[in-house]
Amino acid sequence: MGADSAKAHQTYTVAPSALPDDTPPLDSLPAVVDGHLQPPVEAFVEEIAVPAAPAVDGPLQPPGGAPLTPIPDAPSCGDAAGTPLLVGGADLEDSTATLVAYDSPDGPREVLTATVTADAETKLLEALALTDQHLIPVSVEQQQLQRPQIDRDLGLYEQAVTVAKSVNHHLKAGDEIPAHTHDNHQQLLAHLDHLDQAEQAGEQPDMVAHYRAAAQQLGARLQPGYATAYDDGGKVDQIDPYQIPVTVTVTEMVPAPADQTDDPALLPTTIRRATRIRPALADAQTSWDGTSRSKATGHEYAIDLGDGFRAVYRPHTAAPDRTAVDYSHRGALEIIAPAGGGHSGQLVDRLGQLHLVNRTMTAQEGEWAYLQRNITAQRLGGDPHVRTALAHAAAVEDAHYFELIAERQHDAVGLDAAQLDRFSRQLVLDAQARALTDRVQLVRDGVAKATGLADGAALGAHPGYDPHPHTAAGWLQWTRFDVAGDPAAVTAAFNGRSLSHSLSADRLVGMMRNGGTLTCTERRRRMGVTEVGMSEGSDMRTGGAKSVFLRVASKPSHVGLYWDDPATLLRRSDWYAYDGDHFGALNPDDAHYQSGKLTRDPAAVAGFTAHSNEIMFANGIDLTGADAPSRIRCGTADTRSSVLAALTAQGLTHLGGRPVDQVVTT
Amino acid sequence: MTSDPPDPPAPRWTDEHHQRLRALLGDPDRGGAELEVTDPDGTTAFLAAVARHYRTDGDVLWIRPVLGGHDPGDGQPYTFDLDAARRRGLHHHQVDIDGRDVVLLLASGQHARFRRVRAARHADLERWDTWLLTAVDARTEAELDALDADSHPGG
């Protein structure tokens, strides 16, 4: 679907239905009390043919059904955004994993990234050899970039920065640089002169030269009559701390020798300081050497999965005596394949080694997810039809679960603890699979009636109903059928106003060169973007936001991005909006959040009056795909040329179905 | 295309309002301000130091809370995530001076008070000043000062 889709609308039916022909209509279904049907299960669930006894060992058997997002044989090498997948179950945030193939001289380096939910963390940790028996402390030598000790002792970097800060401040203000700044500068020079003469200088001659160069820059600006404009070369360049590679000894908890552990099934694990993959990004192509990593806050588990595969996981809950992981990094999981492509299937499969669901979502599961998102987006959760449908859907799963227990209880006799655990988990999976068709039909019916339609079949025939996710730049998006069914009406309500995002010409060009994605810091870091004011090798704690925002604008007045057809974006199911900047909790999941001002109603957004209004979109906006803007306003002919060149370099001739030279304007 | 509905009258910012706010914001050698937004019942909804720039645009006051700071450790410079320290707009109906403070009545019904930065947040502001003046190039600094961009993605 989408404004530019050539795909004809298909009517979706739920087939085959597991409900018997004489199933009573929804309104007459038994009441649900404390999650249990009254009268009991037998009055509602027909007897179903008993299947063959399931296996007691080996991998869990997944439900049938075609995958909603097939695993690619090989993700596009160097594609910074990656290929998103929907994974079954609820172990991963948004049920999403992303496959990225970093370019490297050794061939593609394929990595699966995902965020494990807090609820799933326990079973993941149970797969790891983490007890005192399994881990031993080992002193490990590492190469790190550090400031020399003498620099730290004398504070040379701090002295230089203190002077630079004052010089820049007063140059910008156009007033006199105070005497104490001159004195501080002289003190810095004196320290450097002393080091030149002292023995220590012999050890770090480059350090002295580094800071002397900075001091000379500063000295030039301290001279009487210095007249270079601040923003035209007058501002002192960024002064980086001088760093040298240093071998440091750190203690890591590493796997004990195999003969010292009595549970070889657990995965060998090292506990170390948290890191992030540190890729490089050039011309929208991302590369990684397989080893470069930047430091991060907290600790992580480096896991050996065998056969050259490894995983890295940052926990939600810090281990005792350890620093907590940065909020936006909690639950972050990487599964890294050996160099060379073709490992996509294995990457997904190896989620199972971590006790996580390791199969892609089926189409039926996808429709369930689609309905859930539409219930949220269209605020249908409080509707009686939807509430009843959801309650009955939960009861249906319970009913199938208890039925399976009755069918298979004799198979549990004689099982050991591990086999019993597997047995019970398979029961849950099978109950979910059996119930899914019924649940989808029930909830589809409830949503239909909540939105004024006759029944689920009518909803399936709705022109906006499309339970398939759409791939954007590394994530998946679902639509909401109310907007997708009549986008023209939504756009008309805006009365000529657009959605917009302002940014400087430099940032616009850089963003288009990096692949044309408007997205958050965390995702940009995974791509390899170097953020403003970040020095090489340093880490940046992100603010934790995983969304971007646009505003309703009346007239194009700034350099930036403009969507003249707001329905292009509002057909997504993942946005929410405020008429005016909201000071308080923005995230509906936040404990301090107050719902009163938030809206998901397109008509309300069309009526926004505050210039500081915000419409938040999860993950980001793919500017070169179906969500492309109507106009990219560049401000100058030079910027326009740069943006067009960036698009040409990526082989893009059209945006949103229109030639790029019509979209990119001055 | 029909015309937009008329905007409500913009709050009247006098020279005194501007002078008082500028005095509060100060410069890296002195002063500094923080912003506290309170709900109608007095509960604090937001509290942070603010960067030393602002811009009025009709009924919106654009400012930049000092958020998203991070000390990488090992002697590395303190950094800021500009997605967190992005410009924020105070949509307001009224501006007043209360003692040394500048107070806005927001369209949301909340109050926004600019006052001298307190010790707990003064360190954040100092780190922001250092980062802005020594780790960011002049063009980016001007871009941040202008308060007219919604984001500043890296390159």
Image: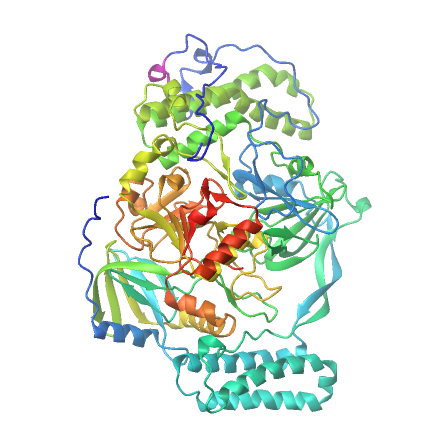
Relative to B54, is A156 on the left or the right?
Answer: right
Residue in view at x 54 percent, y 74 percent? A238
Name the image quarter holding the N terminus of chain A. top left
Tell me residue A181's x, y (percent). Answer: 48, 87
Which of the pair A71/B77 is nearer the observer? A71
Relative to A213, is A183 on the left or the right?
Answer: left
Tell me residue A116's x, y (percent). Answer: 56, 43
Picture layout, residue B58 above or below residue A16: below
Residue in view at x 22 percent, y 74 percent? B15
Name the image quarter holding the C terminus of chain A. bottom left
The image quadrant that residue A567 belongs to is top left
Q: Is residue A219 magenta?
A: no
Residue in view at x 60 percent, y 71 percent? B75
The image quadrant that residue A440 belongs to is top left
Q: How is the image coloured?
A: rainbow
Segment colored magenta: A25-30
Which of the pair A8/B150 is nearer the observer? A8
Relative to A559, is A509 on the left or the right?
Answer: right
Picture layout, residue A211 above or below residue A72: below
Tell me residue B40's x, y (percent). Answer: 24, 55
Q: Is residue A593 visible?
A: no
Which of the pair A311/A39 is nearer the observer? A311
Q: Is residue A343 visible?
A: yes
Farthest top residue?
A: A22
Tell me residue A374's x, y (percent). Answer: 39, 33
